[in-house]
Image: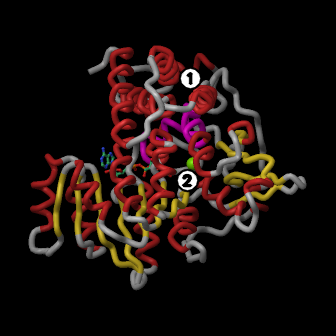
Amino acid sequence: MRSITILGATGSVGASTLDLIRREREVWRVEALTANCSAKELAALAREFDAKVAVVGDEGCLADLREALSGSGIEAAGGRSALCEAAARPVDITVAAIVGCAGLGPVMAAIEQGGTIALANKEALVSAGDVMTAAVAKHGATLLPVDSEHNAIFQCLQGNTIEEVRWITLTASGGPLRTLSADELHAVTPAQAVAHPNWDMGAKISVDSATMMNKGLEFIEAHHLFPVGLDRIRIVVHPQSVIHSMVEYRDGSTLAQLGPSDMKVPIASCLAWPRRMETGCEPLDLVAQGELTFFAPDEERFPATRLAREAAEAGGSAPAVLNAANEIAVAAFLDGQIPFTRIALSVEDTLAQSDLPPAPTSLDDVLAVDSAARERARALLEIA
Ligand code: NAD
Ligand code: MG
């Protein structure tokens, strides 16, 4: 049997992971399941999967969790440090699927126990960068990418050496607003922005897909996972999301990974790695698909990829500032406080007005940069 912890078990990636575990119930022993607040939902999952512990990040939800778990024998805990304690329990694999930099502490705790981390929580890697990759090396942990593009690249690199890579090409669907004019973008509502044509995801990453910041974060994520140099990572818009990313080698061979737009495929690739498992996903039907198209990104209408590239080039604390400012702006947009086009503008302003602190060398440094950047972004947007 293999032991597993799922951080962010009630989210979109968490649900896909648990669907896969349901298919192989005899293989998996669930150690910890976590959520932010949805206590009833979390308790139901913890009972179904016979978890040892269930944790809510928001301590205010702990009483509800305790009540929902009463008589089950499953331990209940709540609060930020309880999340990290749950993540620190030794397991074979941790699926890191909390959204945002809020997941960083638990991811670092999981890394410190030296197991395998299937990382969906890209914001944690974007913010912590070298601090996280150094911890992975120090503790002998294995980082497997869940993000579909990075999982594709990881698969295309098997049996090859990174020195022979000429290009890494990240594909981007372009999101639900790909064809809108600059004027139309200004008036986009949260409901329009989260209605992704190909993927069914949480609200924050859906807005990131609509602004293209998701691809910007993925550019930085790729640079940490696959050290080929920033100038060798490029972005191509591919609206059908059939090719999940590609690697071109110096001999002119390009390897691509294709599959349905279902996160169960990359998650399964991590759970079963280096083997394969059944996912129940529809097989790829290229004839029905008919055509695959590709476009260059338009950084006039969607400046987020430029901002992310500039932050990656600046290095140090810039990516953490970019991520924090984006999290604040996306939450404000979803809350109806700012227009869609203000998201990227406020990220740019936050970066421009920040006296960038030196490169973080510890988790505490990263969290300090993150919290100062959040404050600055809120002040710029004049929100509480
Ligand atoms: P989601 O909003 O559906 O779920 C997020 C999970 O994290 C939930 O369980 C929620 O309770 C928990 N959570 C939220 N805020 C928290 C906090 N402050 N403290 C503790 N827990 C908290 O998000 P998602 O779409 O599943 O995405 C999760 C992560 O995976 C994100 O980083 C996203 O970028 C990445 N990702 C998602 C997809 C996808 O298809 N959904 C694809 C690639 C990468
Ligand atoms: Mg992705």
Q: Nearer the viewer, residue 284 or 383?
A: 383
Q: What's the residue type where badge 1 is placed?
A: Leu
Q: Residue beneath label 1, please? A: 185
Specify the color scheme: secondary structure
What element does badge 1 sit on?
A: helix
Label 2 lies in ligand 2 vicinity (Cβ under 8 Å): yes
Residue 168 drawn above or below residue 234: below
For this view, does 158 lie left or right of residue 340? right
In the current view of this chain or complex, which residue is farthest to the right? 251
Give residue 276's position: percent from left, percent from top.
60, 76
Q: Residue beneath label 2, please? A: 147
Give residue 183's position: percent from left, percent from top.
59, 16
Instruction: Determine the residue positioned at 59% across, 36% down.
Output: 216
Instruction: Determine the residue positioned at 38% across, 32% down.
Output: 370
Q: Is residue 122 magenta?
A: no
Q: Residues within 10 Å of mark 2 (few under 14, many from 20)?
A: many
Give the distance between the C-alpha atoms of the residues marked 1 and 2, in whole angstroms.
Answer: 26 Å
